[in-house]
Amino acid sequence: MTFGQAVSEARKSKELSQKQLASSILKDDGSPISPQYLNDIERDRRNPPGSF
């Protein structure tokens, strides 16, 4: 299982949308990640930042 698959399964088990989860994940500057960025992580198109 990839990191993206694990994130996707955990999100779905909590019954959260990508938008809901993305808004709760904050970058170093305090702003949330975008739902598209989360989608790319879940589909293994992007690597998570080092603080994940």
Image (spheres, rainbow, N blue to C red):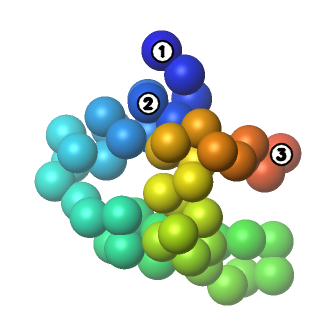
Query: Label 2's element?
Result: helix
- Evaluate if marks 1 and 3 touch, with contact meaning CB atoms under 8 Å apart: no
Q: Residues within 10 Å of mark 1 (few under 14, many from 20)?
A: few
Query: Label 1's element?
Result: loop
**Residue type at tag 2:** Gln
CA gap, disc 1 and disc 2: 6 Å
Residue 10 vertical placement versus 20 (above, below): above
In this view of the protein, which residue sits in the foreground, 43 or 21?
43
Q: Which residue is mark 3?
A: 50
Q: x%, y% of residue 22?
A: 47, 69
CA gap, disc 3 and disc 2: 18 Å
Q: Residues within 10 Å of mark 3 (few under 14, many from 20)?
A: few
Q: x%, y% of residue 30?
A: 71, 82
- Give residue 5's mark: 2
Q: Which residue is mark 1?
A: 1
Q: Residue at x 83, y 45 (%)?
A: 50
Q: x%, y% of residue 24?
A: 47, 71
Q: Nearer the viewer, mark 1 or mark 3?
A: 1
CA gap, disc 1 and disc 3: 19 Å
**Residue type at tag 1:** Met
- Give residue 12's mark: none
Q: Residue at x 60, y 64 (%)?
A: 37
Q: Quadrant of residue 33?
A: bottom right
Q: Quadrant of residue 3?
A: top right
